[in-house]
Image (cartoon, coloured by chain):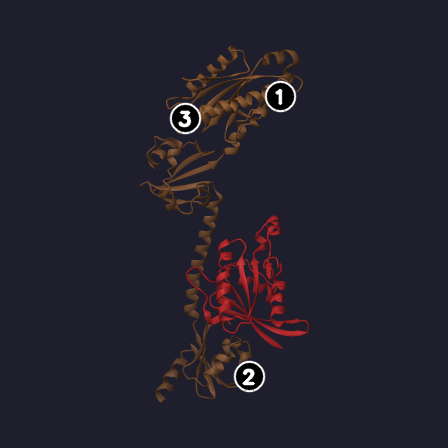
């Protein structure tokens, strides 16, 4: 017992542990001399410990049990009190008295706090950077070993993936969208580096840019410009696409080797409208005709103005039999309509089916030739021309 | 007079300390200082003639690698769960905080603060639909801070 007292005194003299003794009524019986440094007010014998140390409010039942069970204790860790951090524990002393120890852990806790502060700030910085990256356009990081290491939220959203590894399983290779001849991201980088390329993915148009991040990573940026490019490609008079947009779409169809039928449409005797009613009425007829056709084709069919009174229609995923049926419906629609100011009008249609070996020019040439055959045959009719 | 122990719980850097500082001292400090351990503040309130001393435990926030010590939860009558409205992950973790707290204190009451409302635009603020006992708060602008604590006290003394 004497040894324990010596040890205890030695610990107390180090000024890192103070104590308070309380009775079963939670009244202070005695305390070490310097305990007041942790307290708001001066400590007196007879004080209610729950007012001296409110940390124990709510724990009364736990503390009561300690008087009868020596093995029990009640601990509150890292409590900030009067500019100190202390661990507080209630221990068994005897059946009538419990010992409250206040262990000064300020130095170690402040060190821990510095580390925690640094760690938390790093997490916050990382979250902020992530938000910045996600607010940008679609981003893709690729190593010089052709491994995708990071894609941001925008990229994942566009390509419907939830993590980078899914890109691999989906066999998604960005470079194939630009040019099917490109074999890897190295080749894509060589092609795009220091310039911009338009790339069409499904129905969207993107500007693709590439830059080198250190020597190990390449960053590819996709900026969606679909609306902008579409707006620029709209014919202001008729509200349908211009020929340039139609051509690029037709080129994609040809590259994808998809089935499709190209139709060239021409309003019959349109020159007479202009000559008889004037150009203002002529323009209105063009608009009315374009709206009529546009409203009667499928959403994924592409309709454009070639120039003058000539229009183009691309029927994707359609064989020639179905295309003939569809175009006949359109012909009848025009033939049976009463156009404003003018009355009856007709149109002629030339069709060409896309074949494996076709390019844009041969297909257009073929459909145009079919149109002239329809005109020569008396107008208001449909002709199909095989290459 | 009754005394009630309440806890402020949530992820780190959601503004728990700032809410306590605003409520108890009427002050706000923009500087972020991580809380470690716990700091207890007192506040005397009187509601419907009932005097209540709140013992407000400002507990260190949980981080991905460090959860809150369960020892702090013992004997609590209520809790304020705090999230940062600008950090989605702090909203995602809200339910876990509630579950742990209520498993230790099944009869306790709670309210929730979507804090840092000052960082939202007016349009965003107006578009947020709040469930019962959830407050859109700002310790910086002193918005709904008093209301948050008073609602919890009302629930505890009812």
Write down the chain letter for disc 3: A
Q: How far apart are marks 2 and 3 (CA)?
A: 92 Å
Q: Nearer the viewer, residue A81 or B20?
A: B20
- Of the numbered discs 2 and 3, the one sitting upstream in the chain is 2
**Dot in front, 2 or 1:** 1
Q: Residue at x 56, y 56 (%)?
A: B116
Which chain comes out brown in the rendered image?
A: A
The residue that disc 3 covers is A254
Q: Chain B is drawn in which colour?
A: red
Same subunit: marks 2 and 3: yes
Q: Residue at x 55, y 23 (%)?
A: A330
The residue that disc 2 covers is A47
The residue that disc 1 covers is A337
x and y percentages locating residue A336 in the rendered image: 61, 20
Can residue B33 be seen from the camera position used here? no
- Of the numbered discs 1 and 3, the one sitting upstream in the chain is 3
């Amino acid at each position: 017992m004497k040894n324990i007292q010596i040890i205890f005194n030695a610990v107390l003299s180090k000024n890192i542990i103070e104590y308070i003794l309380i009775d079963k009524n939670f009244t202070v019986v005695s305390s070490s001399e310097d305990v007041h440094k942790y307290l708001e007010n001066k400590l007196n014998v007879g004080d209610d410990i729950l007012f001296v140390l409110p940390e124990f409010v709510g724990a009364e039942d736990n503390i009561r049990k300690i008087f009868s069970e020596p093995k029990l204790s009640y601990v509150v860790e890292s409590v900030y009190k009067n500019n100190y951090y202390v661990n507080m524990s209630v221990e068994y002393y005897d059946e009538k008295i419990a010992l409250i120890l206040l262990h000064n852990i300020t130095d170690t806790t402040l060190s821990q706090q510095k580390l925690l502060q640094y760690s938390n700030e790093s997490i916050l910085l990382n979250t902020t950077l992530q938000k910045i990256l996600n607010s940008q356009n679609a981003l893709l990081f690729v190593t010089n070993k052709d491994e995708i290491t990071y894609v941001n939220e925008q990229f994942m959203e566009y390509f419907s993936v939830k993590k980078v590894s899914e890109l691999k399983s989906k066999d998604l290779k960005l470079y194939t969208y630009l040019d099917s001849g490109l074999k890897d991201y190295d080749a894509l980088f060589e092609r795009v580096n220091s310039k911009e390329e338009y790339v069409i993915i499904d129905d969207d148009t993107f500007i693709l840019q590439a830059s080198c991040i250190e020597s190990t990573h390449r960053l590819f940026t996709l900026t969606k410009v679909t609306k902008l490019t579409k707006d620029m490609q709209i014919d202001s008079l008729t509200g349908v696409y211009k020929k340039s947009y139609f051509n690029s779409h037709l080129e994609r169809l040809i590259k994808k080797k998809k089935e499709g039928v190209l139709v060239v449409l021409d309003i019959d005797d349109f020159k007479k409208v202009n000559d008889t009613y004037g150009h203002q009425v002529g323009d209105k007829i063009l608009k009315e005709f374009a709206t009529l056709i546009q409203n009667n084709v499928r959403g994924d069919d592409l309709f454009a103005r070639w120039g003058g009174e000539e229009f183009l229609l691309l029927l994707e995923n359609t064989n020639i039999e179905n295309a003939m049926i569809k175009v006949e419906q359109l012909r009848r629609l025009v033939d049976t309509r009463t156009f404003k100011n003018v009355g009856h009008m007709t149109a002629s249609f030339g069709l060409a089916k896309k074949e494996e070996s076709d390019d844009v020019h041969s297909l257009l040439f073929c459909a145009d030739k079919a149109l002239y055959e329809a005109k020569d045959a008396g107008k208001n009719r449909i002709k199909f021309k095989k290459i | 007079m009754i005394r009630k122990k309440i806890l402020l719980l949530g992820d780190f850097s959601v503004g728990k300390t700032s809410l306590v500082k605003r409520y108890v001292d009427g002050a706000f400090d923009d500087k972020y200082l991580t809380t470690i351990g716990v700091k207890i503040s007192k506040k005397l309130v009187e509601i419907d003639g009932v005097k209540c001393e709140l013992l407000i435990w400002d507990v260190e926030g949980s981080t991905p690698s460090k959860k809150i010590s369960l020892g702090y939860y013992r004997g609590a009558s209520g809790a304020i769960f705090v999230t940062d409205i600008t950090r989605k992950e702090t909203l995602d973790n809200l339910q876990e905080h509630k579950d742990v707290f209520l498993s230790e204190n099944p009869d306790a009451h709670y309210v929730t603060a979507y804090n840092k409302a000052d960082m939202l635009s007016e349009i965003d603020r107006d578009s947020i639909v709040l469930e019962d006992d959830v407050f859109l708060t700002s310790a910086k602008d002193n918005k709904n801070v008093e209301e948050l604590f008073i609602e919890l006290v009302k629930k505890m003394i009812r």
